[in-house]
Image (cartoon, coloured by chain):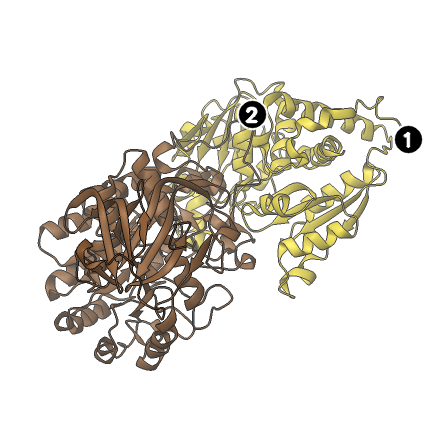
Amino acid sequence: MIDAARANLPVGNEAASWRDRHLLDVDQLDRTEAERCLDLAAELRALRERGERLDRLAGHIIGLAFAEPSTRTRVSFEIAATALGAQVVALPFEASSATKGESLVDTLLTMERTGVQTVVLRHSASGAPYLAARATGLRIVNAGDGTHAHPTQALLDALTLRDALGSLQGAVIAIVGDIGHSRVARSNMHLLVALGATVRLAGPPAWTRGFERWPGVEVHHELEPALSGADAVMALRVQLERQAGGGVPNLHEYTARWGLDESRMRLASEDAPLLHPGPTNEGVELTSELASGPRSLIGRQVANGVAVRMAVLSLLAP
Amino acid sequence: MSRFGSLADAPASFVLVGARLLDPSAGTDAVGDLAVVEGRLATLEQAGDDVPRVDASSLVAAPAFCDMHTHLREPGGEASETIESGTRAAAHGGYASVCAMPNTDPPLDEPARVAFVHSCAQDAAARVRVIAAATVGRAGERMAPLGELAELGVAGFSDDGAAIPSARMVRALLGYLAPLDLPLIEHAEEASLADGTVMRAGPTATRLGLAGWPPSAELTIVERDIAQAAETGARLHLTHLSTAAALDAVRRAKSAGVRVTCDVTPHHLALTDAWVAGERRFAWEDPDHDVSSPGVGLDPSLAFDGLCRVNPPLPARDDALALLAGVADGTVDAIATDHAPHPPERKAVEFGNAAPGMIGLETALSLGLSAMAAGRLDLAALMAALSSRPAALIGETRTLAAGELADLVVFDAMGRWRVAADALASRSANTPLLGMELPGVVKLTVASGRITYLHDLAPLS
């Protein structure tokens, strides 16, 4: 065990700058706060790599409320909370809420009464964490809400990009795919722009419509100008069930026009890294060679996810 | 102190002294005295010395309001509202009559059900006119017994909650209704464009990751129905219009002589789609749609609040301002509330799962006066849109002239009140205006000559 001071963990009222002690989306963080979180994540990552254990959250009970299936984010939060010494309970969401007709608020209030202090919430409805924050006394960490936000994904992407590029100031990041249905893209837009980057969006018109007025963002309907000279490229998962909704005629056409492969990646700056929030549809939004090739930071993203979630849980802790 | 009365009470007699008397159908607006004797508007000479004199200086007296679009929820939704509570909300808001919409459970699609509402409403706090369902079960497949329902005195026909699903059925309905001279009241929304959406399409929906309702969902049905109204010569009334494009289509149709009328709700005049993200400024004071800046984020006490879910969704700011201009220039025939009560458990849920609708009877005047204070409306246009013009569309009159049974509202336009659950007569409190302080305090409502609401107005109190 090591103490908080040695690990440069937040003490006293520093966490008060994390407004209301929730993490609902990255838009609540100014640049200093976001960078503080990334710095702390990097420190915690180093500590973990040295095999050190932390007790920052000893005595805390963190509930994982995943009202939508997600193995990787849930496991990442579970490891992060456990590594900080917290007790982790999985809220039996599908069983307790959906089948019995219990509302989200009722379920969370019950958890609050049993002593859970922080809930990591994944929900299929955009805005559900805001409802949870409003209607309960719990500290809410948004682990992805509908098509709205996924703040810890954006933070781990920013950490991964910062490691690869040195700084995001002035960087050009291309995000390719179904932006409209992507909570990952939205949170990344907020955070990357706040950290000084320019974001280019590329994808079929139905999947990029409406983002033209987003500050710091450019929208392209062709892939080439979006990739040209980009410092990094992020591919999004094509939700296979969504292409029936009219976004693209078929997956083959998506891959032909917006799929990423090595030759297209050469339009970007030399050695431009590739990110993907996972899970990938290899052969659809990117080739398997790209996913496992030297540009790919997909494995780093997953590893950074634990560090970032440790940092978030530490910063939010009272 | 406040008290409610009912249509079953004895007729009232009083003289208002020194009120601002505003009669939109007569085009008059002057300070004076107004007598009501045995429930009827009377000359001052007819009011004897025993009739109480009420000091109404600094108050406005106008013909009472008429709501063309009210969900009273009875039968079937009594947890949210009843005919009694809903008409009290109407009286509190200054209304003498409301039109009960037919999407109850069961729907008001046959004479016995309409008669049930009529019988329940005999001692209500406002007259209840029924809008009957246009098709059996509101299913859009077979016409309801329109002629029989018309004989019961219904004010119109509507499958509100959804549009008539096919142009063919619209044509059949309008053709049958033309000689009855009753309107088809259309909820203009193309289902194939609107299904699955939860708020108005636009920058706020994009930012919030909420599925956006395109304005074309409304325009598509408006233009379809106007074409049928033009060919059949029947009356078409488009309710709760929410877009500038649809209003322009109505404006063009009116100038071409089509018998089309329309209403807008107070919330589509005053609120905007940005309210879903936590904005709480009215359309006319909202400088832009940016409700957050980096480092601040959305306010979880306001953002994604199910109280802001309504159908049609809260409009873009430009639309709200265009609708206000339509009220001011008369293109909009009526302000109708679409008063839609829901219990808390239908609202304190994820935004997209919240039941659409908000209450409106008790805040319509206040929102109108707020728009007036901002220079967007004048009082005469507001009063006409709340009283005489909707009344004319359902065959009622509104006047301050002697002789008629009095339908009267007296209010303090400068007085302010705070919207709170315990200040509302409705059984529900689902409005995002909760907690706001608004202008416009109703002091007296008279319906059919009976005092249905009275608030701090000596010596009547």
Image colour for chain B is brown
**Above or below — where is B176 with respect to B290?**
below
Residue A313 location, x and y as percent?
A: 73, 35
Q: Kindly identify the residue that appears in the image at 50 percent across and 52 percent down.
A: B352
**What residue sits right under mark 1 in the picture?**
A1
Total labels drawn: 2
**What residue sits right under mark 2 in the picture?**
A272
Residue B159 location, x and y as percent?
A: 32, 67
- The amino acid marked with disc number 1 is Met
Marked residue chain, label 2: A
Query: Residue furthest toward the right?
Result: A1
Residue B28 location, x and y as percent?
A: 16, 45
Of labels 2 and 1, the one closer to you:
1
Image colour for chain A is yellow
> Quick one: label 1, few (<14), some, or many (20+) residues within 10 Å?
few
Q: Is residue A90 visible?
A: no
- The amino acid marked with disc number 2 is Ala
Quadrant location, the C terminus of chain A? top right
Q: Is residue B449 visible?
A: yes
Q: Kindly identify the residue that appears in the image at 63 percent across and 41 percent down.
A: A142
